[in-house]
Structure formats: structure tokens, C-alpha cells
Amino acid sequence: MINKKHFCVKILDIIFPKEYALCMEEQLKALTQIGLTQKQAIVYTTLLELGEAKMLHIAKQAKLKRPTVYLVIDELIQLSLVSVIEKGKKKIYSAVHPNRITEILESRKQQYQELLPDLLARYGSIRGKPKVQMLEGIQGIKQAYQEAYALLKEGKNEGLWFGNISFLLEHFPLVIKEYDSVLNSLKESRIRELIIGDEKSEAWVQKMQKNPKPQHFIKYFNDEGQCGITDQFIIGNKIMLFSMNKEIFTLIIESEEIVKTQKFLFDRIWNSV
């Protein structure tokens, strides 16, 4: 029998990083969070501790009634987390290697990927009603830029940027680096940028203009400090509004009418610069 204290550290070394030396209660919680029921998690970890055991011993160790354990064991066998062999007239049960949990998670991930197109179709099925999503904090901003770059890579629509680049240069250099990579990979999408801000923004525009990319067009517009520290991206029927000063958040609006108006205003400014 494995020592419980040693078991707490070792059992999920395979499933979770070693720095998370989970105690038994935390292990059970983690297993339920990845899809097992509470009783399935109890029986599985009990078998990991016992090695091999008869039903009576499992029920006693797990502190569950035998009829309940019978049902749970059957469920774990279906998940290929428990194996059974017969020794004489007795059935002996043992836990399958914890790597099996990784396989289950990968399978569920694949199932989700296959389901995703249908979910997206449902998400976009309501016509005439704008969809609004708000992402808070720095992580939300990074997530929104990732979505913006993905939309550009689809190669279906022109992307329009309007904003202050100096804040991004200072606080999100990796975002700018990835954007440069996106620009280099574009073959069909066209991008126009209207950059505002201080001398850092102007210098960045001049740098980009010296090394032009076929699908990228950029202009500097002196707003004389009247605009806030924001960024705005328009593509398809989406507009992303980034607030990056005291209030850090991203607002994503999906609306053909709103985008139509914003594109009109963008073109007016673009043609006047």
C-alpha cells in the first residue's frame, strides 16, 4: 500500500505539474473539474492507492456502499480508467495509469473542436440584433488582439485601424511584434491604419512607411492630444474598441449598421489626411 502522504505528492505528478503538490481533497476537486463525478474520483483515487482490490475492500476504503461502488466501477470501466480481472470466482479491480485522463481530455477537446462550427453558426444566427462583448483587463486586451489578427488572416475583409500606437509600443511590445508578423504573412487582406498620438506614434508611422508592405497602408494624423489612449479596429461586421489608459477593457460590437457608420467616418478622415 502506498503511503498516503507520499501518494498526495506523487499520484498526480503525471496529470498536473509537480509544483502543485495537491492534497487528497484537492485531487478530488481537480478530478471533478475535468469531468469525473465526485464518486468516480473517490473510487479511482482509492484504487490508485490500493493497487488491486476486491469490491468489498474498495467500498470499505472509499467509505461508500457496495451497490454504489458497483455502479461507479462500471462507469470507470467504460471510461477505461479501471480494469478488471478474474481470479477464481473473484473479480479483482485496478486503476488504469493516470495518463488515461490525458487521453480523455484530448478526446473531449477534439469533440469540442468538431462541435465548434455548429456553435458559431448558432452564435451568428440572430440577425438584426447587435452582439456586444466586453473583455476586462490586460488579458482581455491581448485576447481581443488575437481575435483581430485571426480575422485578418482569414483574408476576407479589409481591416481598418484607428488609434494611438505609442501606448502599445511601451506596454504591449509583443502585441506589436506579432502584428508585424501578421503583416508579413498577409496575401489577400488589406489593412489601412490611421495613427494618432505623440512623436512616438509619428516616428513609428515614418518607420513603417520606409519599409512598406504590399497590403498595408498607413497615415499619421495629428489629433493635437484631443483623443484618448484608445485603439479601434474595424473588420467585417465587427468593431473592437480598446481602452488602454485608466480604464483597461475591450468592447467588441458586431453590428453591420454601426460598422457602416464607422467605416464612413474612417474614410472621411483618411481622405482628408
Image (spheres, rainbow, N blue to C red):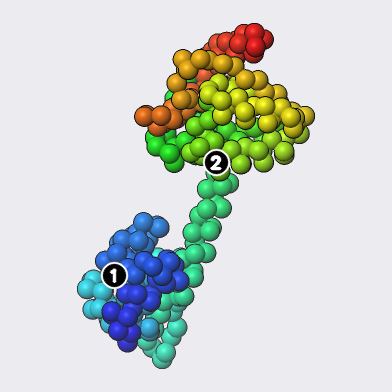
| Number of the label disc, if any, that sits on residue 173 | 2
Instruction: Residue lying at the far front in this picture: please name it.
Output: 199
Q: Nearer the viewer, mark 2 or mark 1?
A: 2
Q: Which residue is mark 1?
A: 23
Residues at discs 2 and 1 in contact (Cβ within 8 Å): no
**Quadrant of res 203:** top right
Distance in Å between CA atoms under marks 2 and 1: 40 Å
Quarter of the picture holding the C terminus: top right
Q: Is residue 145 above or below residue 217?
A: below
Q: Is residue 81 visible?
A: no
Looking at the rendered structure, the kind of residue marked 1 is Cys
**Quadrant of res 210:** top right
Quarter of the picture holding the N terminus: bottom left
The residue under the point 64% across, 27% down is 205
Between 48 and 177, the one lying in front of the other is: 177
Q: Is residue 25 above or below residue 262?
A: below
SS type, badge 1 = loop
